Image: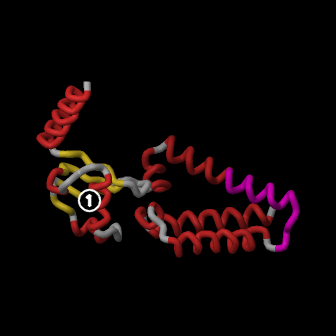
Amino acid sequence: MEIVFRVTIIFFFIWAVTRALGKRELAEMTAFELIMLITIGDLVQNGAVQDDKSVTGTILTISTIALWVLTLSYVGFKWKRGRKIVEGDPVMVVHEGKLLERVIRTQRISTDEVIESARQQGIDSIGDVRVGVLEADGRFSFVLCDSVSHHRRQNVLAQERTSI
């Protein structure tokens, strides 16, 4: 039973640390961060089971983690407030073509990251974006201004007609 308590404490500690790190850090890890994540995994294993190398200890560890993952998933699914606590909130980083610098600093992301993400989604200019959101999972979503959206749809339709 001691293993269950150890794993529970470690599980919630890791959950709190990942929440504190922020969205972008987890979405785009560097090679060093990946190595540190693997190292943390080894350290967690040592702290969770100590000297217990039995199959029972392993099953208890995995079962406890699975139980907490399912519990947090259910809380996030069932209650809106629970989802905010477990997963976090999306945050607007672009409004009417302007980067929200204060929000970007608070989220510890760079303006270059926002612009790069927009480019990867085929958006030439942040000025074309009506709303840009940093989602709870660390990805960016962009909604284009109506005139840009209409212009893009017309271009796509024109390209489809010429290819037929």
In the rendered structure, the answer to whether residue 21 lies left or right of residue 8 reads: left
Look at the image and give the residue range highlighted in magenta: 51-66
Residue 130 sits above or below residue 7 on the image: above
Residue at the (26%, 61%) spot, across then down? 115
Of all residues shown, which one is farthest toward the front? 163
Residue 32 sits above or below residue 124 on the image: below
What residue would you read off at disc 1?
Answer: 93
Q: Residues within 10 Å of mark 1 (few under 14, many from 20)?
A: many
- Point out the image quarter for the C terminus: top left
Give how far across and how far down residue 142 sits, in percent. 27, 49
Residue at the (16%, 51%) spot, across then down? 128
Residue 144 sits above or below residue 110 on the image: above
Give how far across and how far down residue 20 sits, in percent. 46, 69
Residue at the (63%, 70%) spot, across then down? 38
User: Which three-letter amino acid code belongs to the residue tagged 1?
Assistant: Val
In the rendered structure, the answer to whether residue 5 lies left or right of residue 88 reads: right
Task: Tell me if residue 57 is in the magenta stretch.
Answer: yes
Give how far across and how far down residue 159 sits, in percent. 21, 33
In the rendered structure, the answer to whether residue 65 lies left or right of residue 164 reads: right
- Point out the image quarter for the N terminus: bottom right
Task: Tell me if residue 143 is in the magenta stretch.
Answer: no
Residue at the (47%, 44%) spot, across then down? 79
Quadrant of the rendered structure where residue 158 is? top left
Viewer-proximal residue among 83 and 162: 162
Of all residues shown, which one is farthest toward the top? 164
In the rendered structure, the answer to whether residue 20 lies left or right of residue 72 reads: left
Viewer-proximal residue among 130 and 71: 130
